[in-house]
Amino acid sequence: MNMDFQSVKETEDRFQVETYAKMDIAVERGRGTRIWTTEGVEYLDLYGGHAVCATGHSHPHVVEALKNQAEKVLFYSNLVYSDIRAQAAEKLVSIAPPELTKAFFCNSGTEANENAMRMARFATGREKVITFTGGFHGRTADSISATFLGKYRDIGKPNVPGHVSAVWGSIESVRAAADMETAAIMLEPIQSMAGVYEAPPSFFVELRELCEQLGIMLIFDEVQTGIGRTGSWFFAGSELAGGVVPDIVSLAKSLGSGIPVGACLVNDRVSGVVKTNDLGTTFGGGMLAMAAVVGTLEAIENDRMLENITEFEQHLRTRLKEVEEVVAVRGRGGLLGIEFAESCKPVHAKLLEKKIITGTSSDARILRLLPPLCVSKEDADMFVDALIAD
């Protein structure tokens, strides 16, 4: 049954508990960087379905992988072995830094972060976790307690004990908080929701040294930076990280091209302390999700999307020099924050009127772009031209 926008809106508002403030569009279909509404209107999606659709909307290779798996078996849990789960685990580990040797699959980013902190506590026998002002790690109990951004931590009260914050980018602040009771230091390598705030490579090198000195597990929350978002498969091990590889990397969003899936990649020290029944998940590692992971990673490789997103960033940065209102451009690859002198809310609204979807952030001046990795230079031109036009 086809429904017009007003019918969709009224039905959702009547029967669904409120979540986000929604745009006044109902998405019916998508392909690549474009979505179409129930009214047949085309939009350029530079927000990537909420930073999720790395391969673009409904990439044919991912769709085919899902169809093939659905015809065989939709689901069975980790109580059995699975050929597609084996393929997904091997493929994911193969593209990771060599220090990260095993994968744990779950359902979402917040679940990945919960399990990352749990494994760090297993490995150290400690409880305290240090995270950073401006960081966002999810909305479940432990993850929201690790989030020191705006109102989010208050939403999660009563908070899980043992969480403390340090100042983002300040190694002195971390040293003041870290001690022999600290299990983990967890961070977003680029703080996306805060406004795309970065730290220099030296910061990650100093963090790694501190962790080695005090026996602390280092966790990179790569829910947003992982799976090619910054132009390499992971921030971990890259030049941006000073070559640092953490003990645990958490993943989600881009990992399944829109099919819910999360994961943790861990080193031998961490995997060696995890015993049977220490971790559990009914749906994590399910067959459809694993088919989506394999299809996603293959599509990114086959279409040279890592190279493409780097070229997109370079082209966009050049074009944005033409926009007088732009104060700065932060981030890497397909995780970019465009800073304006004043609130970007009118810019966001203006772009939506021009049928271009972008994102905002906790910093009112920062417009965020999280496009599919298949985004083109022509898409960048369309965006900049819309910014310049009256």
Image: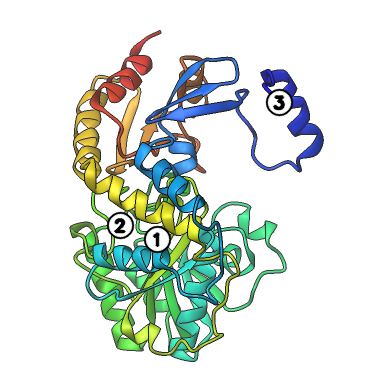
Residue type, numbered disc 2 = Ala
Tell me the number on the disc at residue 381.
Answer: none
Image coordinates for residue 268, horizontal then vertical, percent: 32, 84
Residue extending furthest right?
14
Label 2 – label 3 distance at C-alpha: 43 Å
Q: Position of residue 110 (x, y in %)?
A: 54, 61
Image position of 196 with respect to 340: above or below: below
Mark 3 surroundings: few (<14), some (14-19) or many (≥20) residues within 10 A: some
Q: Is residue 337 visible?
A: no
**Residue at 49% across / 60% down in the picture?**
287
Place of residue 382 in the rendered image (x, y in percent of width and height, measured from the top left): 32, 18
Q: Position of residue 276 (x, y in %)?
A: 51, 87
Location of the N terminus by quadrant is top right
- Residue 214 to residue 379: above or below: below
Residue at mark 2: 199
Q: Are marks 1 and 2 in contact (CB under 8 Å)?
A: yes
Residue 168: mark: 1
Amino acid at dot 1: Trp
Q: Residue at 47%, 73% (x, y): give it.
A: 116
SS at mark 3 in the image: helix
Q: Residue at x 45, y 81 (%)?
A: 120
Q: Amino acid at mark 3?
A: Val
Which quadrant of the structure image shows residue 199? bottom left
Residue at the far front in the pictured view: 72
Write down the residue under mark 3: 8
As drawn, 211 above or below 88: below
Residue at the image position 44 percent from the left and 65 percent from the top? 263
